[in-house]
Image (cartoon, rainbow, N blue to C red):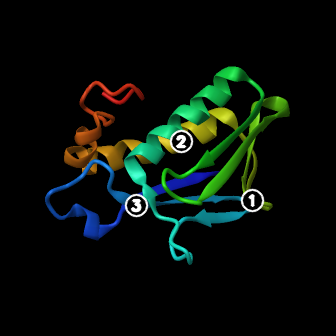
Amino acid sequence: MIRFSFDVDPSELEPPSPGFALGDMEVMGGGGRATSRGHTPDQSMMIFVALSDLLDGLRTLAVRGSGSFHFVGTDSSFRLDFTLGKGDRITTRDGSRLVDAASPATEVLEAAYRSARPFFERHQGLAEVLGCCGGCGSPIGFR
């Protein structure tokens, strides 16, 4: 089972809070884990923008029904590759490293949304600056 985790860098929570707060993403699957944390150079990303891109890209991949989605964290070099293959299953890679092999597409989307929703709710004030969060009539579907 694939899992996602999102965090805002604590130094980014000080007022005034820009909507472009830096944060990190972690993805854990049956083949390993990929994280933007702890790299040199730093791979933190504009987490609210990046998370919106991730959710939209995964949704688009599922609707398209085949192909790949190459996610790159906003203002970061952190990258994940999602490939939708036979049987409506998504393989997730961090470069050449396998993170998760062939999870059902619905499971990957649900895992991403299940992790994103409480993240957006926890940081609603920051996310509202961008107009992209839960509870505010989001274009990514949180209500």
Instruction: Determine crowd level at label 1: few under 14, some 14-19, many 20+ residues with C-alpha closer than 10 A.
Output: few
Q: Which sits in the foreground, 31 or 46?
A: 46
The residue closer to the viewer here, 68 or 116, is: 68
90 sits left or right of 76 in the view = right
Q: Position of residue 84 (x, y in %)?
A: 76, 35
List the residue tagged with mark 2: 54
Which residue is nearer to you in this view: 122 or 127? 127
> Which quarter of the figure has residue 79?
bottom right
Q: CA distance from mark 1 to mark 3?
A: 20 Å
Residue type, mark 3 in image: Gly
Question: Mark 3 and mark 2: span between their CA atoms?
Answer: 14 Å
Residue 100: quarter of image: bottom right
First in sequence: mark 3 vs mark 2: 3
Mark 1 or mark 2, which is nearer the start of the sequence? 2
Q: How many tags in the picture?
A: 3
- Residue 140 at x, y = what percent? 42, 29
- Circle 2: residue type: Leu
SS at circle 3: strand
Image point (19%, 46%), residue name? 125
What's the residue type where badge 1 is placed? Gly
Name the residue tied to disc 1.
Answer: 95
Question: Does 19 sit left or right of 47 as displayed?
Answer: left
Position of the C terminus by quadrant: top left
Residue 86: x percent and y percent?
85, 32
Residue 42 is situated, as x and y percent measured from the top left of the image, at 50, 72
Q: Quick one: label 1 or label 3, which is nearer the N terminus?
A: 3
* Residue 8 position (above or below residue 58): below
Helix, strand or loop for disc 2 = helix
Seen in the image, is 98 located left or right of residue 70?
right
Residue at image mark 3: 23
**Residue at screen point 56% across, 78% down:** 40
